[in-house]
Image (cartoon, rainbow, N blue to C red):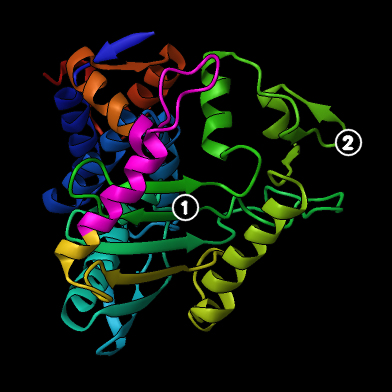
Amino acid sequence: MLNFPQTKLIKIVHDIFCAAGASSQDASQVAEILIANHLAGHDSHGILRIPEYLQSILDGEIAIAAKPEIIQETPTSAVVKGNWALGQVVGNFATDIAIKKAREVGVCAVSVVQAAHTGRLAVFTERAAAQDVVMFMTIGTVDRPMTAPYGGAAPILGTNPMAFSIPNAQGPAVTLDFATSAIAAGKIKVAKAKHEALPPGCLLDKNGEPSTDPNDFFNGGFMVPFGEHKGYALAIIAELLSGPLVGNESYPGVTQRSGIFIFALKSSLFQPKEAYDTALQRSIQKIKDIPPAKGFTEVLLPGEPEAKMAAKRMVSGIDIPEDTWEAVKRAGLSVGVDVDQIK
């Protein structure tokens, strides 16, 4: 395991994507988001994605120089056409539109079509929470099907994640962010890079047999929904909100992907902000006052583990598996960047 300060990793990501053809501004957005994911403890959405994104650029699935645009809007809604630009750039663009409209008129719904892989959704919902906007975001099937429906024997769904963030003036945003599959695909990649087994109950091999070997996923295996029928039902909601509702099929592209659905509302929509803040803290304190169960030191809110991890990693640095680092080095060299020379 190798260890790097966040500043070096940000510079590495920035330089690789600039060399691949991105503007410095776009490369910075990708870098900041990938490393923010590392800081939060979600290495599955960090630099291990670089080789994948560079291959998508070569395959024409990401248009490195493209820019997202608004193609339809009302005071409370917008349709954003990503034009297959870098997914993190599209995510920030759409999120900022939702934030602006929600702050101006109270609520906003945004459809995003032709969106490349955005990565961890909490980055965007927490961006909204930092501006006193509550946000919900979900995306359906991306790339190849990876997850079987409940009761099904073959994959048809993606990981179909969803995220919520609620502004919290006295601490980190209260954030829920999870895949509706039993494990995120990126975490399978991390386990593979670390040569570790997966938890039982999340993966079936190509023959439909339970497996804990991450290599089986890349050899035709597939995931199952978390919580059986409950996770499956949430996956269907994600699929339908970010597909038929946002109108993704009306904007085809080089890959078959669902779009993104975003809903935002300002935290002071129903009452003055001061009243909201007071009520929120009262509810939070009731929960955190509960004594911890055996084996726990405190009751945590969603989003607190990530905030604690970020505080730790900003001091201790970010651990990167050697397999991941070697893959990033090869990816860098493919665009003329020697990451070992970056300070």
Numbered tag placed on residue 59 in the rendering: 1
Q: Residues within 10 Å of mark 1 (few under 14, many from 20)?
A: few
Q: Residue at x 36, y 40 (%)?
A: 303
Please state which amino acid type lies under the numbered disc 1. Asp
| Image vertical order of residue 249 relative to residue 285, above or below | below
Figure quadrant of residue 224: top right
Q: Quadrant of the C terminus?
A: top left
Q: Judge whether residue 30 is colored magenta.
A: no
Whether residue 301 is visible, yes or no, is no
Give whichever of 333, 340 is nearer the camera.
340
Foreground: disc 1 or disc 2: 2
Q: Are marks 1 and 2 in contact (CB under 8 Å)?
A: no
Please state which amino acid type lies under the numbered disc 2. Asn
Say whether residue 148 is left or right of residue 27: right
Give whichever of 99, 4 is nearer the camera.
99
Q: Residue at x 76, y 47 (%)?
A: 228
| Image vertical order of residue 310 relative to residue 128, above or below | above
Residue 48: image location, x then y, percent:
41, 30
Which residue is labeled 2 in the image? 207
Tell me the distance, in whole angstroms, between the alpha carbons under discs 1 and 2.
30 Å
Q: Which residues are magenta?
A: 277-305
Whether residue 104 is visible, yes or no, is yes
Give whichever of 68, 228 is nearer the camera.
228
Q: Residues within 10 Å of mark 2 (few under 14, many from 20)?
A: few
| Image vertical order of residue 2 relative to residue 285, above or below | above
Considering only order in the chain, which callout, 2 or 1, is on the residue closer to the N terminus? 1
Residue 310: image location, x then y, percent:
26, 28
